[in-house]
């Protein structure tokens, strides 16, 4: 079923003004500081298996997953920086440490080995044994692909083999599935890396068994209700699910795993369920930024069109998982609409979660922040250097090195440019270089550096209303099919395509059912969502009424990296006629004013500030 696949991390080198810096900051800052945090908190030492009651840094049920994600990021960094022998040696030492913690039967989990050995497999619903195993497996596959070494891969094969003796359809095994999904997609990766179809069959079992009656989670604890099952996407079989429900990160990891299983088993029914769930998200339950999850209660999707701005959860991990889910459907179907959402989430909801320096993070990504914003738990007004639940910082370690692989995909004798970020790709003897300043500029030169006969497909984004394409100066008249223009020819070294995407400022409105955005607009240019920040506009954001008829201009954004463009326009500033009263009857006056909007993903990189994405207008 799968038509395309993403390119390996090391085959793409980004050189654009928006993404390339993030990859470098991850390598220079995010990964090293995350290693320091893992060491400081005991996450690394937990693999030494020398913790005893009364000692500090008591291991936690999800610590293994945190360190595994940092290790996966290190593997990708080594693939991008083969000259960094210091990092490669450090990585090798960590792999030896992790492998040393494996038990004779193949089990690998530092919490249940040291803290609660009698509790192994006692609470699949809440405890993270299978989730941690999945992240360790993903890290092992990344390590094998980056280095060719099998020592970590073989260890995780033993772990997966052991899990296969605990779970399965046989009468003597547990008929369960992960409480925090992720192992499903990891097992598919392991099957691909090893050629062992048993790992795929185990992934398929977990997907097929989920939500069946009698319900495993209710057998585990009869007190669990429908709402709790829905939070774990276990309230009905996955093929019957059509609405994105429950914990948003769990859901999106599951959906990505479902897509992997559907592709590998040519399961059209399961793929249809994936498509329906994707539509539920993109058409009714996703923020304009690509954020997912609209409540901190259960970190969950709620109901259609419930998208509050000042209490938005929109967990960074959820946006990253949405990119992974969209990428899979894009590769399976070749339909550009999945690339549209992948790009939307990547350029906005994901990158807002990490500072430009790479050292501070949002767990929840609000769309509206002011002095009276209520903060609680992970909902904060300012990025934090770390979280006790550190899934988001460690997820960035492994996500950011993959940015180039999201931009490109391949099929037999074909390369596909999904996101036209500047950079170069070298794959199977085909070398292509992309220039330009996307996403700030719509002029995208593409130079073929190697001769040969192959297909090259360029995506025309769904947000683009007009474009032009030339080949060696001659107009190309081909029309997009499913969002892509595909050219097949005998290419000569030096052939040049010039793609120009019209990129005006667009006024966007929400469905009237989204009551939080009623009467408001958002501004987009290209794939970027823009926002007002008090740094540029003062602490009067809710009193500004944007004049949509006056037109907009772009200009360099003050005190942000070179090349970043701000949107400027006219507005009216509504006077405060309240005189301090909570409610009043006096009519406010309108005063002419201007405004400056910056890319949402870059907000609060210039100090604490108020924020507004959905704007009043006149």
Image (cartoon, helix red, strand yellow):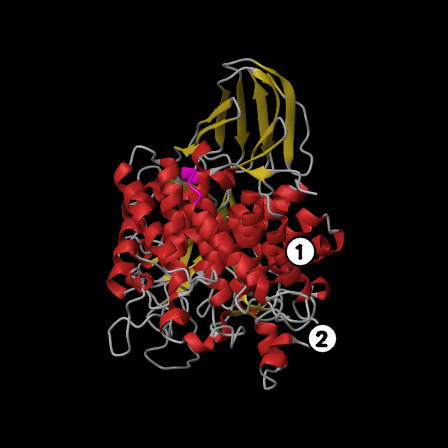
User: Would you place residue 445 above or below residue 386 in this image?
Assistant: above
In the image, residue 148 lies in the stretch drawn in magenta: yes
**Nearer-N-terminus badge (2/1):** 2
The image position of residue 345, as x and y in percent, is 50, 51
Which residue occupies 42% across, 46% down?
Answer: 151
Could you tell me if residue 590 is visible in this image?
Answer: no
| Lateral position of residue 371 relative to residue 106, left or right | left
How far apart are the two marked residues, 2 and 1, measured between alpha carbons? 21 Å
Q: Residues within 10 Å of mark 1 (few under 14, many from 20)?
A: many
Most extreme residue toward the right, as rendered?
Answer: 269
Can you identify the residue that label 2 sits on? Answer: 213
Is residue 554 or residue 572 the one in the foreground? 554
Counting labels gives 2
Can you identify the residue that label 1 sits on? Answer: 274
The image position of residue 128, as x and y in percent, is 47, 68
Q: Residues within 10 Å of mark 2 (few under 14, many from 20)?
A: few
Is residue 276 or residue 255 the one in the foreground? 255
- Magenta residues, start to end: 146-150
| Lateral position of residue 227 relative to residue 1, left or right | left
User: Would you place residue 129 above or below residue 491 in this image?
Assistant: below
The image position of residue 505, as x and y in percent, is 49, 44
Which residue occupies 54% across, 50% down?
Answer: 324
Kindly report which numbered mark, 2 or 1, lies closer to the viewer in this rendering: 2
Is residue 462 or residue 106 the one in the foreground? 106
């Amino acid at each position: 079923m799968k038509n395309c696949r993403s390119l390996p991390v090391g085959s793409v080198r980004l050189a654009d003004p928006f993404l390339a810096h993030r990859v470098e900051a991850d390598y220079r800052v995010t990964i090293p500081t995350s290693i320091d945090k893992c060491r400081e908190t005991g996450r690394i030492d937990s693999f030494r298996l020398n913790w005893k009651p009364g000692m500090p840094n008591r291991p936690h049920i999800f610590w293994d997953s945190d360190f595994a994600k940092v290790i996966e990021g290190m593997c990708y960094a080594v693939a991008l920086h083969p000259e960094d022998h210091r990092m490669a040696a450090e990585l090798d030492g960590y792999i030896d440490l992790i492998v040393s913690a494996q038990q004779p039967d193949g089990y690998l989990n530092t919490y249940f080995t040291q803290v609660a050995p009698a509790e192994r497999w006692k609470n699949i619903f809440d405890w993270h044994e299978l989730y941690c195993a999945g992240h360790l497996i993903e890290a092992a596959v990344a390590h094998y692909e980056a280095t060719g070494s099998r020592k970590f891969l073989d260890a995780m094969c033993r772990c997966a083999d052991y899990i296969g003796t605990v779970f399965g359809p046989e009468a003597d095994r547990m008929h369960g599935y992960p409480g925090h999904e992720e192992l499903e997609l990891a097992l598919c990766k392991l099957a691909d890396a090893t050629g062992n179809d048993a790992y795929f069959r185990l992934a398929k079992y977990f997907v097929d068994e989920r939500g069946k009656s009698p319900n495993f989670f209710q057998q585990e604890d009869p007190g669990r209700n429908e709402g709790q099952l829905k939070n774990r996407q276990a309230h009905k079989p996955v093929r019957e699910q059509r609405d994105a429900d429950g914990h948003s990160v769990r859901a999106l990891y599951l959906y990505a795993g479902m897509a992997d299983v559907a592709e590998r088993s040519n399961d059209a029914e399961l793929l249809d369920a994936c498509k329906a769930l994707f539509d539920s998200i993109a058409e009714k339950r996703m923020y304009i930024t690509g954020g997912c999850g609209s409540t901190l209660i259960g970190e969950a999707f709620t109901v259609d069109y419930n998208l509050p701005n000042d209490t938005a959860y929109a967990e960074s991990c959820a946006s990253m998982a949405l990119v992974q889910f969209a990428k899979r459907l894009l590769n399976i179907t070749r339909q550009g609409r999945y690339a549209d959402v992948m790009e939307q989430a990547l350029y906005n909801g994901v990158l807002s979660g990490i500072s430009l320096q790479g050292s501070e993070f949002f767990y929840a990504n609000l769309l509206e922040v002011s002095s009276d914003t209520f903060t609680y738990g992970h909902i904060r007004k300012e990025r934090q250097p770390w979280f006790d639940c550190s899934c988001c910082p460690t997820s960035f370690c492994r996500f950011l090195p993959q940015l180039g692989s999201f931009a490109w995909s391949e099929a037999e004798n074909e390369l596909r440019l999904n996101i036209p970020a500047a950079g170069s790709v070298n794959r199977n003897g085909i070398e292509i270089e992309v220039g330009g300043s996307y996403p700030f500029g719509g002029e995208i030169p593409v130079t073929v550096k190697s001769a040969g006969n192959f297909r090259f497909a360029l995506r025309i984004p769904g947000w683009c209303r007009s474009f032009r394409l030339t080949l060696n100066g001659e107009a190309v008249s081909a029309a997009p099919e499913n969002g892509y223009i595909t050219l097949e020819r005998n290419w000569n070294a030096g052939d040049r395509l010039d793609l120009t995407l019209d990129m005006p400022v667009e006024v966007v409105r929400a469905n009237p059912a989204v009551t939080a955005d009623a009467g408001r607009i958002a501004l987009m240019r290209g794939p970027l969502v823009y926002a007002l920040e008090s740094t540029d506009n003062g602490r009067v954001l809710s009193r500004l009424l944007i004049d949509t008829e006056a037109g907009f201009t772009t200009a360099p954004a003050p005190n942000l990296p070179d090349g970043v463009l701000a949107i400027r326009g006219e507005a009216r500033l509504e006077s405060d006629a309240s005189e301090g009263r909570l409610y009043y009857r006096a009519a406010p006056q309108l005063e002419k004013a201007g405004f400056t909007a910056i890319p949402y993903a870059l907000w609060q990189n210039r100090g604490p500030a108020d924020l507004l994405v959905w704007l009043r207008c006149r």
